[in-house]
Image (cartoon, rainbow, N blue to C red):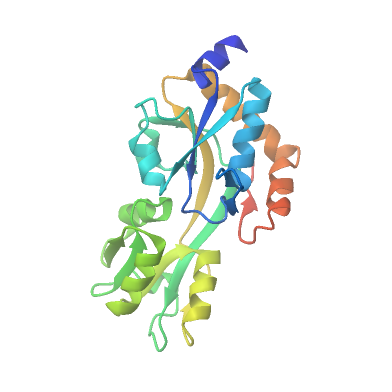
Amino acid sequence: MDAIRSELAPHGVLRAGINLSNSLLVTGRAPSGDPVGVAPDMAREIAARLGVPVVYVPYANPGEIADSAGADAWDIGLIGAEPARARIIAFTSAYAEIEASYLVPPGSPLHALEEVDQPGIRVAVTARTAYCLWLERNIKRATLVQSASLDTAYEQFLGDKLDALAGLGPRLISESARLPGSRILAGRFTVVQQAIGTSSVNAKGAAFLQGFVEDARNSGLVAQLIARHRVVGLSVASS
């Protein structure tokens, strides 16, 4: 365990990079200002098993967590596992999954996911999210209009009269309620795999985290955390 602690908690604490933009994983703030939710609780449990305190390092979006990998800013990062990020971050398998789809405006001629990737179609999306990275790899004909945040993506979708808004299912349900006549296309274009990452040089630490995630899924810990925080739209990942 000492070798694992030396990799994952070299400063005597476990610094956990937390993505504040994902409201399914971070559902609020404690009086202390610390983030509250499934992701912070997962980090706290890892710290407990290592026998060290946890310190949360909040980030506005997952891209910022990935950018700071290797800069000694965090020891573990709880974000969506993506090939573009895996070049510098060693990810566990997923502990939770979130479906992503499209919201289309009232009167839209789009009725199926496969109809979105067509010439002339403009899709609003939050830049550097896991589902945006997926769209960048897979959308060939439509145009992605990227915004800095979830709120600005929705504003651009409305203001510029874009053809679709890409997002995670629960957020799209919320946005649809604000826009009468809008529709969420059935199905999903991807499933965002929420995982735990550490520096790619931390071989022992990465193996420990993988074992933790497998135990957290199989023991029911992830399901318990989802229920505790009353999160709708977040599912335990399949093993």
Q: Residue at x 40, y 35 (%)?
A: 86
Quadrant of res 155: bottom left
Q: Residue at x 23, y 75 (%)?
A: 120
Quadrant location of the N terminus in the rendered image = top right
Q: Position of residue 228 (x, y in %)?
A: 73, 51
Quadrant of res 87: top left
Q: Residue at x 63, y 34 (%)?
A: 44
Compared to residue 72, the image places residue 218 above or below, namely below
Q: Nearer the viewer, residue 31 or 84?
A: 31
Is any atom of residue 151 visible in this view?
yes
Label total for image: 0
Q: Is residue 226 left or right of residue 145?
A: right
Q: Residue at x 45, y 30 (%)?
A: 74
Quadrant of res 45: top right
Is any atom of residue 185 visible in this view?
no
Q: Position of residue 224 (x, y in %)?
A: 74, 47
Quadrant location of the C terminus in the rendered image = top right
Q: Is residue 77 left or right of residue 225?
A: left
Which residue extends farthest top? 2
Q: Position of residue 15 (x, y in %)?
A: 51, 29
Compared to residue 139, the image places residue 38 above or below, namely above
Q: Nearer the viewer, residue 59 or 63?
A: 59
Compared to residue 146, the image places residue 8 above or below, namely above
Q: Is residue 125 left or right of residue 28?
A: left
Which residue extends farthest front? 31
Q: Position of residue 219 (x, y in %)?
A: 76, 37
